[in-house]
Image (cartoon, rainbow, N blue to C red):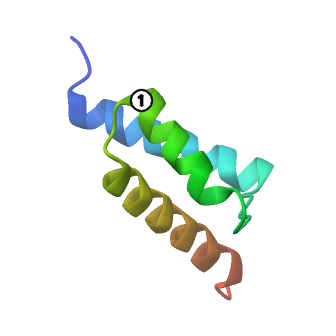
Amino acid sequence: MGLTKDRRGEIALALLQDRIANEGLKLSPKNTKRDIGNLAKDTGIPFDEMMEFAEWISRETLEKTFTKK
């Protein structure tokens, strides 16, 4: 029994969120957009989609960081 594409995506997202939580998120106005562009090029994911995802994951991380528990 193999994993579905959706389940692989869920697992990949959980791994990414864990990595960001443990290693931090580097946001540099000077380099971030270029880094996202390079990642989009390397992965074949359109730049607009990669930028939207990067913005979403960054906001998610900030919300979790500053939410009172």
> Which quadrant would residue 63 be assigned to in this image?
bottom right
Q: Which amino acid does label 1 sit on?
A: Thr
Residue 26 percent location from the top left of the image: 74, 58
- Is residue 60 positioned above or below 47 on the image? below
Which residue ends up furthest to the right in the rendered image?
A: 23
Residue 6 percent location from the top left of the image: 23, 37
Q: Nearer the viewer, residue 65 or 40?
A: 40
- Relative placement, left or right, of 22 versus 52 is right
Which residue ends up furthest to the top in the rendered image?
A: 1
- Is residue 36 positioned above or below 54 on the image? above
Q: Nearer the viewer, residue 23 or 31?
A: 31
Split into 4 quadrants, where in the image is the N terminus? top left
Residue at 38 percent across and 62 percent down: it is 52
- Is residue 54 positioned above or below 69 on the image? above
Residue at 76 percent across and 49 percent down: it is 22
Residue 17 visible here: no
Q: Which of 22 and 38 is in front in this view?
A: 38
> Which quadrant would residue 67 be assigned to in this image?
bottom right
Residue 43 percent location from the top left of the image: 42, 29
Residue at 61 percent across and 47 percent down: it is 35
Element type at mark 1: helix
- Relative placement, left or right, of 60 versus 20 is left
The residue that label 1 is drawn on is 43
Split into 4 quadrants, where in the image is the C terminus? bottom right
Residue 34 percent location from the top left of the image: 59, 51
Residue 8 visible here: yes
Residue at 50 percent across and 46 percent down: it is 37
- Relative placement, left or right, of 29 versus 47 is right
Q: Dot 1 surroundings within 10 Å: few (below 14), some, or many (20 or more)?
A: few
